[in-house]
Structures are given as structure tokens and as C-alpha cells.
Amino acid sequence: LWFSSTRRRNPPGNLPPGPLNLPVIGCLHKLGSLPHISLHKLSKRYGDVMHLKLGSVSTVIISSERAAREIFKRHGLEFASRAPLICGKYFENDYNGLVFSQYTPEVKLYRKLINTHLLSPTKLKVYDGIRREEQCRLARSLSYERGNPVLLRQKLHNMNMNVITYMLFGKRFCGHHKNTANVDEFVQAIVETVRLAGVFNVSDYIPGIRWLDVQGLEKKYKQLMDRINRHLLSILRDRQEDPPVFTSDEPMAFIDVLISMGEKLSNTTKITLLLDILLGAVDTSALSLEWAMAELLRHPAEFSRARSQIDAIVGKEKLVDESDIAKLPYVEAIAKETMRLRSVAPLALPKIVQGGPIELDGYTLLDGTVIYISSYSIGLDERFWKDPLEFRPQRFIDLPDIDVFGQNFNLLPFGTGRRVCPGAKLGFDAVQMGIATLVQGFDWKLDGDLDDPAKLNMDQTFGLVCQKSQPLVAIPIPRLDSHVY
Ligand code: HEM
């Protein structure tokens, strides 16, 4: 058994090679607590296009730039639908939204709506004031913390949450004195939804035992969504009954755009789309930024290099702003290097083959096969990246044409193809601005008695968004004149 499970096998039906599948569980036991790392190790043995069964679900893992390019350049449409996860049924009110849904005409329409009315360059410009205010609030609140340990994740989360809730609802949801307990409860429910969506649900892979709900997950999904739907519906109805007067200070928020579509969209779809965007936006940017800071604190020489460039270009008399970012290539390189090495979505979201069969590398992928694109393996591929485990932003100065937006298949932190992240520009800019602000505004010390910053614990926890297992706690020491913050 050991021999047959470890040697390279060519399974029947012209499937790609992969490890031996056990009855009932297939290869579920091989995933462990960090599936992206386990799959990466298996792909080294079985190849860039690897097949395994997760329970009864036929699954293919794509681990190279070449295979990912082949799929999306030649078969984009066949790889545009999501695998129908059980959590998606609940979190999208019966697949009434975007993130977990198949590629239907409705999903195309929702993406168009979001791209045009929430995330287009014109719309992003309308909201540059709110991003600036939140950046200044972050810098000011850190300056008040002078010399005290700070849980950075919480502050970054609040900043991103406020930017996105302002764009969606015309209001900040975090740390606002007028907020009610309801709003705090809602924010907690969103955080909990992201957490639960990342918990591996065994019933997705062994559907025969779904009725048992052995992990108690479906019960939790339902309770959570009852709370979230109630809250979102009440915001929606209030706004429908009492619409604001729009001015240049009070632009149309995305909820108003959805309301203006009247009955073309049901209220269920409206609230589901709002939730989708919250799920996509909030933790991804904040946790990427936390990873970037952890890497910079472990690599003081990289921190100093970024600092020198910011001081030379921006100076010390004002906080860095978005118009400076294009002049700070080292900050951009740090953001890219963080996303290569510490991708928060290392397997993106699973897709499913539809309209197949598809031929890939001489193998046949049948309809219904679940596909994971491992941006983790692609980012660590020694065939392209020298010393891939090293944090070395300079590599992106040497390769300036590699961008993160899904066109270059060597770096796919936002996915690619028809389901590429629609918030990539907003998310990437948030990470760059965050790095620039924290490096320009503060000297940092690590909390505790860590004698060598290189020993900072970088363990990770897998989920819908992969995060540092131990949140980063660091001590800010403001270095600019107080009037700058
Ligand atoms: C650093 C920040 C972010 C990262 C790393 C990230 C990453 C991703 C990834 C990997 C996907 C799946 C793509 C695929 O399947 O090919 C995705 C989807 C998505 N993201 Fe992001 N994202 C970020 C920020 C944002 C922001 C700011 C928003 C909204 C304002 C957003 C909204 C979404 C939505 C709605 C989807 C689902 C798209 C679909 O299914 O068609 N994301 N994101």
C-alpha cells in the first residue's frame, strides 16, 4: 500500500497523475491543517497538474505558471464557475450573489455593476478623501500609542472596514462614536463569516454524511446569516424609505446604486452583493498588510531601504499620499514580494470545469472536476524565482513588468481569468499605502524579549484568508513632527 501510494501513478480515464485515493476519504487525510503547503509538497512528486480525490470529489491542482496560463488563455469560459460549496449556499442566500456562484448571466451582470459603480477608476477617485482620512486616523492613533505595544491587525482591520463600508453604505462602521451595539455586532458577524467560510467542511467532499452535519457548521452558517440578513435588510429598508440627498460631499453609495435598480434586483440579491464585497474586501487587505509589516520588521535592511526612498521623495513634512505611490517603486516591490511569499489566498477560490471535457497536457479534465490554482506553488516555483523562500523585494525591481492583476501568470495573488478579484486595484493600493505610512511615520520595536527579529514567529493559519497565527504586536515610536499626524 505504501509503495503504491507514493510512486507516480497514471490513473485510469486519462486523469493527471496523483497519490493513491483511499476509499471514501480519497486524499482528505493528506491535506492537514495547511492544505496549500501539503498540496505544494505533493505537486513536487506528482507534477504541475495533479489529480486527487477529496472524499468523492475529483480535484485537480494546478501548480505552475505554464499550466495556469494554458487553462486561462485557452479555456477561460470552461474554468469560470465556482465549485458549489455548502457555505456558499448559506452565505449567498442560495447562490444569489457572486463570490461562490456559477458563471451565469446574473454573475456577469453583478461583476459589471461592481466594476462600474463601485470600483471603476472614477468611483475610486470619488472616495480618495475617505481613504486619506482613514490613513490619517490610523497614523494619529498610532502616534498616541507611542512606546506601547499595539495589536496592528485590529487597527488595519478597522481602517479597511471603514473605507469599504463608506463606499457601500455611506458610513463608517468601526470606532465611530455614533455607532450602536448593533453595528458592532454586525462587524463581528462579518469577521465570523470570513472565519467560518474558511473552515474545511467535510460534507463538501463526502456528501453522503451531510445530513449529520458532523462539525455543526450548517447550524452555525444559518444562525450567522439570520443575523447578517436581518441587519442588512434593515439598512436597506431604511435607505429605501428615507433616501439621502446626494451631493459632492455625500456621493451615491453602492447601496443607493443597487436601490436605483428597483425590481431588476431582488432585495435578497442586493444584500447578498453587499455582503460579498464585505467578505472579499475586509480581511484580505488588512492581513496582507500585517504580513508585509512582519516581513519588514524581520528584515531591517529592507525597512531602511524603503524608508530612505520615502524620505527622499516625500520628505518629513507631510504624510505620504496616494499621488506619491507611483514614485515609490521599492514600496511596490515590498507589496508584491509579500503577496508572492505570503499570499492570503494561496489556493484562491475553487473553480469547477463546465462545458468540458478539457484537454490539458495530454490529460482529460471532465465536467464537474474541481480546480484549485495554487498561487502559493506558482509563487515558490524555483524554475522562475531564485531562492523563492527568501523575502527579497529587489527581485521585483529587477522584473518591473510583473504585475499582480492576473495578466502575469507567475504572480497571481488576486487570481486570474473571468473571476479575477474585482477589488485588486483597491486592495493593492491599500497595501502599498499602508506600508508607506507605517514605514514613513514610525520606528518600530517588536514586543516581548525577542533578541533577533529574524526569529519572529511566522506560522500561518489556513482559511478563506490565510493569516499569521500569532497576530503581530509591535511598538510604534513616532518620528515625524506631531503636526504631520
Ligand atoms: C489584498 C487584497 C485582496 C486580495 C489578496 C484578494 C484576493 C482575491 C482572490 C484570490 C480572489 C479569487 C479570484 C479567483 O478565483 O481567480 C478574489 C475574489 C474576489 N474579491 Fe478579492 N482580494 C483582495 C481585495 C478585495 C477587495 C478590496 C474587494 C472589494 C472591494 C474584493 C472583492 C472580491 C470579490 C467580490 C471577489 C469574487 C469575484 C468573483 O467571484 O467573480 N477583493 N479576491
Image (tube, rainbow, N blue to C red):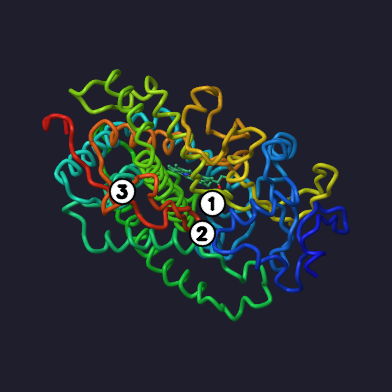
Describe residue 364's horizontal placement relative to residue 416 as left or right.
Answer: right
Q: Residues within 10 Å of mark 2 (few under 14, many from 20)?
A: many
Give the residue displayed 83% in from the left and 47% down from the top. 363
Residue 287 appears at what percent x and percent y? 40, 48
Give the residue displayed 18% in from the left and 44% down from the top. 141
Q: Which residue is mark 2?
A: 92
Circle nearer the N terminus (1, 2) = 2
Q: Residues within 10 Å of mark 1 (few under 14, many from 20)?
A: many
- Residue nearer the viewer, 56 or 256: 56
Q: Are marks 1 and 3 in contact (CB under 8 Å)?
A: no
The secondary structure type at the circle numbered 2 is loop
Q: Does label 1 point to a residue whose CB lies under 8 Å from ligand 1?
A: yes
Q: Which residue is mark 1?
A: 99
Q: Does label 3 point to a residue whose CB lies under 8 Å from ligand 1?
A: no
Separation of residues labelled 1 and 3 (CA atoms): 43 Å
Circle nearer the N terminus (2, 3) = 2
Q: From the image, which quarter does the C terminus lie in?
A: top left
- Residue nearer the viewer, 337 or 102: 337
The secondary structure type at the circle numbered 1 is loop
- Quarter-wise, where is residue 444 in the image? top left
Residue 247 appears at what percent x and percent y? 25, 33
- Residue nearer the viewer, 386 or 48: 386
Please indicate, yes or no, whether residue 215 appears anywhere in the rendered image.
Answer: yes
- At label 1, the amino acid type is Val
- In the displayed structure, 74 sits above or below 149; it is above
Q: Which residue is mark 3?
A: 451
Residue 440 appears at what percent x and percent y? 26, 30
Task: Name the outermost residue toward the bottom.
Answer: 212
- Residue nearer the viewer, 71 or 392: 392
Residue 278 appears at what percent x and percent y? 41, 51
- Quarter-wise, where is residue 48 in the image? top right
Please indicate, yes or no, whether residue 242 appears anywhere in the rendered image.
Answer: no
